[in-house]
Image (cartoon, helix red, strand yellow):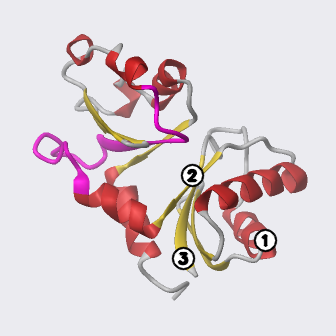
Amino acid sequence: MTRQVGLLRGINLGARNRVAMAQLRELMEALGYTGVETLLQSGNVVFGSKEPAATSERRIAKRLHDEIGLDIKVLVRTRAELAAVVKRNPLSEHADNPKHHHVVFLSARPDPKLVAAVDPADYEPEMFELHGRELFMWWPAGVHKARLTHSFWERKLKVTATARNWNTVERLLQLAGRDGPV
């Protein structure tokens, strides 16, 4: 059994794509996942699974569509993958506020040419660094004033993207490190 972290894109933002966390936990348990825990109201779920992360992504998204009628993009990382993200943190010297330091999780490794087409100097003082399927972001003025948002990256890189602030990333790793709910 591997601990995995599900990141649902764009749920519970205002009045759209509403999913109660209790309902999400029930849905996950009905899929056979174990030790299901949710964090916040923004689509973070930690669970145990015997299947590959890519299979979990497809199954969760299909169940959300079939049961709730929502087309939600779901990204899944294993606990080991999330631990590598936290360990890597290439912007730690600059990011002095965890609420302004984000990780944008991507559905696939983007084409390097598309990434190279974004000139970091055009967006200063914002900073970014790509590592595999994660973009590390520093938005010194905060997410609401950011120009390099997850939506920007989706359009530029032609992948699904969902962002979590550093506090949430660390908390998800902590939850994934446990064997299940306390």
The residue sitting at 34% across, 65% down in the picture is 83
* Alpha carbons under labels 3 and 2: distance apart: 23 Å
The residue under the point 25% across, 11% down is: 122
Callout 3 touching callout 2 (CB < 8 Å): no
Mark drawn on residue 167 = none
Q: Position of residue 152 (x, y in %)?
A: 47, 22
Towards the viewer: 45 or 13: 45
CA separation, marks 2 and 1?
20 Å
Q: Which residues are magenta?
A: 88-111
Residue 79 is drawn in which quadrant? Answer: bottom left
Q: Position of residue 116 (x, y in %)?
A: 32, 18
Q: Which amino acid lies under the numbered mark 1 shown in the image of this protein?
A: Leu
Residue 104 lies in magenta, yes or no?
yes
Task: Please state which amino acid type lies under the numbered disc 2.
Answer: Ser
Q: Secondary structure at mark 1?
A: loop
Identify residue for label 2.
42
Badge 3 density bin: few <14, some 14–19, many ≥20, Cα 10 Å: some
Judging by the rendered image, the residue that carries numbered circle 3 is 2
Count of marks placed on residues: 3
Task: Give the dominant element type of the magenta stretch: helix, strand or loop.
Answer: loop
Q: CA distance from mark 1 to mark 3?
A: 15 Å
Q: Is 34 one of the magenta-colored residues?
A: no
Of labels 1 and 3, earlier in sequence is 3
Q: Reading the chain from its start, which is encountered first: label 2 or label 1?
A: 1
